[in-house]
Image (cartoon, rainbow, N blue to C red):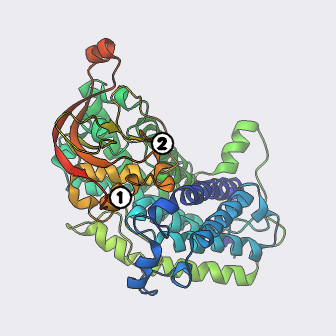
Amino acid sequence: MEWFTAPGYWLTRLVLQRALAAVYLVAFLAAVLQFRALIGERGMLPVPRFVRAAPFRRMPSVFQWHYSDRFFAAWAWAGALLSAAIVAGAADAVPLWAAMLMWAALWVMYLSIVNVGQTWYSFGWESLLLEAGFLAVFLGNARTDPPVPVLWLMRWLVFRVEFGAGLIKMRGDSCWRDLTCLYYHHETQPMPGPLSWYFHRLPRPLHRVETAANHVAQLGVPLFLFTPQPFASIAAGVIICTQLWLVASGNFAWLNWLTIVLAFSAVDGAALLAELLSLPRHTPLATGPPGWFQGVVIAATALVTVLSWWPVRNMLSREQRMNMSFNALHLVNTYGAFGSVNRRRHEVVVEGTDEERVTRDTAWREYGFKGKPGDPHRLARQFAPYHLRLDWLMWFAGISPVYAQSWFGPFVERLLVNDPATLRLLRHNPFPDAPPTHVRARVYLYRFTTRQERRATGAWWHRTLEHEFLPPVALRR
């Protein structure tokens, strides 16, 4: 079965698996550092309460059988350590079957977290990481040449990510069709980065060029992933460059980095290395892949082929949906982003006071978040690929209170008692010695300052109070 393996793609496999394991490491560390406040036993959306209402068949997870904060922490730390071991090369130092078990363990461990993560884990990059991790199980290790079917499945995955995003834009907001969406996007995106102000201030004709280039990169270039070399490598290179542009312009957790990793499945890494360093091409291993491995890969390929019916139907539908899983295992999903673009940015600003009575003269102090805009003079930070889950949900709350119904009340309750786990999610707690007596939230309209305003005030943002989000509340005594 000479067609089954691609000896020249040994470097491609190496980059794919090591980089994917690095993304897993970031995901598990984010779980370790944030879960207590978000989904812990005393969290805003506790896992024990959730699993009582969610059957195993719909949300398969080890935490359906047992949950405690200590067990969750041990589970997430184990996932982080296993990810780090694979980054260091552990999966290439063990037999093929053991390497496959290591990757399968990563997939199962993160699936258990996502399926009880509720709103906090409702983002498309969670499913993307799970689907990519499942495919990595069948890439083998250094003891066998990379299987061709799995490399094609990875190209199929990155195609769905890019092409699905392109379709949802063209079918969605009219600003994508008239090339004006980037007049607003850099300012209104969920979590701007340190360069977002500069991207927003680019000339408008260049924004139109950006938008047109995005359509080409998402609707045209992905088709060439399935063409012979060097065209497939060139297409992958264009996708990688486009994603790096997005990395520079904002914070989208590990979405862009994971897309870059997956795009590398179309790069003939060994040929590129040989060309650059004048090295001989890799030759096939003396012994081919074992028969049982070939059978498992063919079975996995058949499974993905059958499950592809649902995302293909979704992409062809006029009612296309973004970032949707069609099964509880998050396999062969549909993807997409920014089918609509906000024209104005609304931010929920949370404040507290230590005064016993609230009057018109009450002094309020603002809570500072790590990633979302707050203090107009504070330059946005770069956090991606790390995912600040609370900050992202605060962006949705600014769009509509409906998005915050399940968790905002519990969040405020924890601020009123200075809950340590919740405060660790924030950059600044204005009440370090004693909790506030009252907390309130107000909605502000934010916009980037002009160049003149920036020079005059040093501020990156200008904000205007719009309306009340939550009136002052206190704990019952």
Give the CA distance from mark 1 to mark 2. Answer: 17 Å
Whether pointer 1 and pointer 2 mark residues with C-beta atoms closer than 8 Å, the reply is no
Q: Residues within 10 Å of mark 1 (few under 14, many from 20)?
A: some
The one nearer the camera, 436 or 32, is 436
State the residue in front, 81 or 151: 81
Look at the image and tell me whether residue 3 can be seen.
Answer: no
Residue 298 seen in this snapshot: yes
Question: SS for tag 2?
Answer: loop
Q: Is residue 261 left or right of residue 413?
A: right
Residue of label 1: 413
Q: Is residue 334 above or below residue 430?
A: below
Q: Amino acid at mark 1?
A: Glu
Q: Which residue is mark 2?
A: 433
In which quarter of the view is residue 343 placed? Answer: top left
Residue 375 x %, y %: 35, 31
* Residue furthest right in the image: 286
Q: Is residue 233 above or below residue 321?
A: above
The image shows a total of numbered marks equal to 2
Query: In the visual, does 108 lie left or right of 171?
Result: right
Tell me the residue at 61%/66% (across/down). Answer: 73
Q: Position of residue 146 (x, y in %)?
A: 68, 65
> Image check: 223 left or right of 90?
left
The residue at 40%/64% (across/down) is: 44
User: Residue at horizontal 22%, vertical 61%?
Assistant: 402
Pick whichever, 179 or 287, lies toward us.
179
Q: Quadrant of the N terminus?
A: bottom right
Q: Sequence-wise, which precedes: disc 1 or disc 2? A: 1
Quadrant housing residue 461: top left
Amino acid at dot 2: Asp
Mark 1, mark 2: which one is toward the viewer? 2
